[in-house]
Image (cartoon, rainbow, N blue to C red):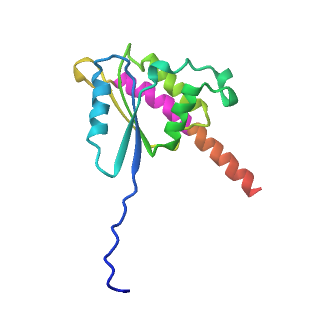
Amino acid sequence: MPGNESPRPVSIPLLNILAISGSLRAASTNSALLAALAQNAPPDCHVSVYDGLGRLPIFNPDDEGERTPPQAAVLIDAVTAADGVIVSCPEYAHGVPGGLKNVLDWLVSRDAAVASRPCWSTPRRARCLPAPHWSRSCGQCLSRSMRKQRSKSRCSARDRRR
């Protein structure tokens, strides 16, 4: 009977977050942090932890497009499908560790897959101290990608107006 129906529960959209650890260490506190985040995420949030860092081939611009290696395509697709990205990473030699730099190279080279994704990072040094060099290094890489993407958007908007 119309009017006697119980109200339907409002479905809350699921937020999909991709978490990337920049450490390959088996006992990494960065990886442990992301695993805890995934296990304790609220019901309306799904956190997937990317585990392909050690299998990702070294970035080569000649391998983009149709020649993109499957492992890189998995990463790019995961970031593209995510609503946001969380990076937890140690600071090595005052900067981004090689494995994470490789991830960033694959992501920012491909039409700025990360440019439209909110990104949060939790860089740490030994003894859980903040990592200012890592933050600056990672921020520069991601912000260049975002500027490149915004520049492309402006150009295509100008072309549409002509």
Q: Is residue 67 above or below residue 9?
A: above
- The residue furthest left is 127
Residue 104, percent from left and from top: 50, 27
**Residue at the right extreme, as displayed:** 162
Q: Residue furthest top?
A: 93
Query: In the visual, does 37 lie left or right of 110?
Result: left
Quarter the N terminus occupies:
bottom left
The vertical placement of 126 against 38, above or below, is above
Give the quadrant of residue 90.
top left
Q: Can residue 119 be seen here?
A: no
The answer to whether residue 77 is visible is yes
Question: Is 129 or 65 nearer to us in this picture?
Answer: 65
Does the segment drawn in magenta span residue 109? no
Total tally of numbered discs in the picture:
0
Give the main secondary structure, helix, strand or loop, of the magenta stretch.
helix
Q: Which quadrant holds residue 110?
A: top right
Residue at the (37%, 45%) spot, across then down: 46
Query: Residue, x 53% and y 32% (percent of image)?
Result: 74
Give the magenta part as a residue range.
132-146
Q: Relative to residue 13, is residue 16 depicted above or below?
A: above
Which residue shows up at 38% across the image and 18% down it? 24
Residue 123 location, x and y as percent?
33, 27
Residue 52 on image: x %, y %? 46, 25
Q: Position of residue 135 (x, y in %)?
A: 38, 28
Q: Which corner quadrant holds the C terminus?
A: bottom right
User: Of residues 59 and 95, which is closer to you in this image?
Assistant: 59
